[in-house]
Amino acid sequence: MASATDTGAGFQPLEPAALEFRDGTPWSSRYGDVYFSHGHGAEESRTVFLDANGLPERWLDRDVFTIAETGFGTGLNFLLTWDLWRSRPGAGWLHYLSVELHPFTREDLARLISALPQALRHLGESLLAQYPAPVPGFHRLVFPGERLSLTLMFGDAVDCLRQCQAQVDAWYLDGFAPARNQALWQEALYAQLARLTPAGGSLASFTAAGHVRRGLENAGFDIQRLPGFGHKRERIRGLRNAQAATPDPTPPWFSNPPPAAPAEREAAVLGAGLAGSAVALALARRGWQVTVVDGADQVAAGASGNPAGILMPHLSADHGVVSRFTLMASEFSRDWIESLGLTVEDLPRDWCGALWLADGKRLAQRLERIRERLPLPPELMRAVDAAEASELAGVPLELPCLFLPRAGWVDPAALCRAQMAKAGVELRLGRPVSRLTRDGQDWLLEDEHGVAITRAPRVVLANGAGMPGLHPGIEPRPLRGQLSVIEASRITRGLKRVLCYEGYLTPATRSGHVCGASFVRGDRDTRLRPEEHASNLAGLRRVWPDALGELDPPMAGRAALRFNAPGRLPLAGPLPGMVAFERCYGELHHGRRPDSYPGAPLLPGVYTSLAHGSRGLTTAPLSAELLASLMHGDPLPLPRDLVEALHPARDRVRELKRAR
């Protein structure tokens, strides 16, 4: 397997597969092998992978069934599995994980899909609608109507699987013949297969090479040779034996709680904004009973009630954790919103793209560094000069920029309402929660008089500030933000893209152009202030001098509180009991081995989706998918290092490691 070339501190661009055909069969010149056999590729895949893994019988009564694959290639194995799932579905969800170092481009995959039989072609078109750009990392695709998810892990197989957190029931060991792809078929791969596979899990492969069989047996699989398909003499299938499990590399302070048993799949979500409504939908899609509680009298009463918000990644030249997470999150959020199946009248939005303008010396230098060191595919980002920026925007601009074609704006309040409606949750509005009290296996959500509002075995704090008494030392910090709403004029009505600079401006929405936003730390006042309107307009005049003429600062606008945390990432994950947590890990600064510490003392059944700051449209859906996966027992949608970067105790762990 070829290695990617590192062109920056944190980004390794992928080299997509080049589509070739030999005698009508997809061929890889890089590996000198076919993607599937000529004339009977589908039949071979069914025999070698699906039948040998005992499908569909093994998934019929399973609540969660996970299949993983070591080479996505043309997607044929996935589409055949999806087709079988549709004809004989299981009781719960099917999760399909697949690794690929050299993914096809969307255009080449479309060519391959167009040649498939009608049934598979229809599924392939649904795959194409969400198929990601060839960027390293995890890409979770959700098909809620099918109770199916696909997690594409683009990158080196061993590296990706080291970052994977899942319990795999069946493996498709694909990825070209061992003699032609020696970098894949190695001991490090077999070790990861063993780590991710519980006793009784199965594998199947077209290859029966002796070193592959021996490597799998040494890793803990009982291997059986079977007659090969077509001209191949032998193939294999295997079962994970009951030997000692491979240690989990997750540090104990970031250990995950066990998922809920089927009888316990009931949750109370505190907060009816973007974070809470996304969590409610992610759980409801998995069959959970969800109650959403909020102290306000309406959904999206806080910052989630703004007339428009921007959906775009927060990129950096080093492509660190914030850049990586928000890039994955923005792509996931866009597909998540479209999965609701609503018209733009019911859910106002526009995937118009965003022009990130070089506003001032510091931002100009930052954008130049991103352009040089973060070579994303052009469908995600490209540099443009002022002339092209003006053409793209539909209005005259004087600054160069980075164009983000897949960014856009959304009405967040409408999104909150839509998520609640799709989830079919029980809503309890106008009921402020003052405390959580443990009562047997349940949590009671109580008001200030001690009256129980609701009870549930699982609770998700998604209310911005959380409940500080439950998590001392990791409270999200308040940020006042005021936006201005500008009436569309003859000049501004032509704007076709979101403008981002030290502020932002949307194209005309139902409310007008939304311009924002102030950013005042620690200020909880939500009254409108003329000076913040003036500041918003001053920023706009700086990048588009002709937009407003002599317009006075408008008094139309909205001020709301947002909450963030150090590190500029949400706090999404299980909530520790912080007093016990600090007592347990108070000596982390001594540098002892992680396995010398016990697992984290967690508040039973309590999770958070907090501190989304001004990026809730971008980050809330993927954070919700992460929490729902943790709670339900699904494969996690993010690599391990990002799961840990979102953990509610991440900053406290860092402080404890530095303590002296």
Image: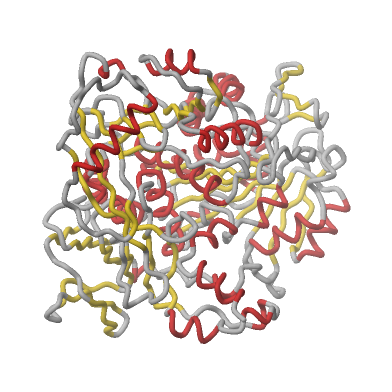
* Of the pair 400 and 110, the residue shown nearer to us: 400
Relative height, residue 165 to residue 176 (above, below): below
Is 484 situated left or right of 517 in this image?
Answer: left
| Residue 172 pos. (x, y %) | 66, 47
Q: From where the camera sits, is residue 418 visible?
A: no
User: Left or right: where does residue 42 sit relative to residue 38?
Assistant: left
Residue at the (55%, 79%) spot, across then down: 599
- Where's residue 644, x and y in %? 55, 62
167 or 24: which is nearer to us? 167
In which quadrant of the rendered view does residue 655 lie? bottom right
Looking at the rendering, in which quadrant would you find the N terminus? Answer: top right
Residue drawn at (53%, 18%), measured in percent from left and top? 385
Report the label total. 0
Task: Report x, y in % for residue 100.
Answer: 67, 40
Q: Position of residue 600 (x, y in %)?
A: 52, 78
Residue appearing at x 32%, y 69% in the figure: 459
Q: Quadrant of residue 6?
A: top right
Q: Quadrant of residue 29?
A: top right
Q: Residue at x 53, y 34 (%)?
A: 132
For the rendered model, the colour scheme is secondary structure
The answer to whether one can see residue 291 in this image is: yes
| Quarter in which the C terminus is drawn | bottom right
Above-or-below relation of 336 to 263: above
Along the horizontal axis of the image, is 381 left or right of 509? right
Question: Looking at this view, is 272 or 605 the one in front?
Answer: 272
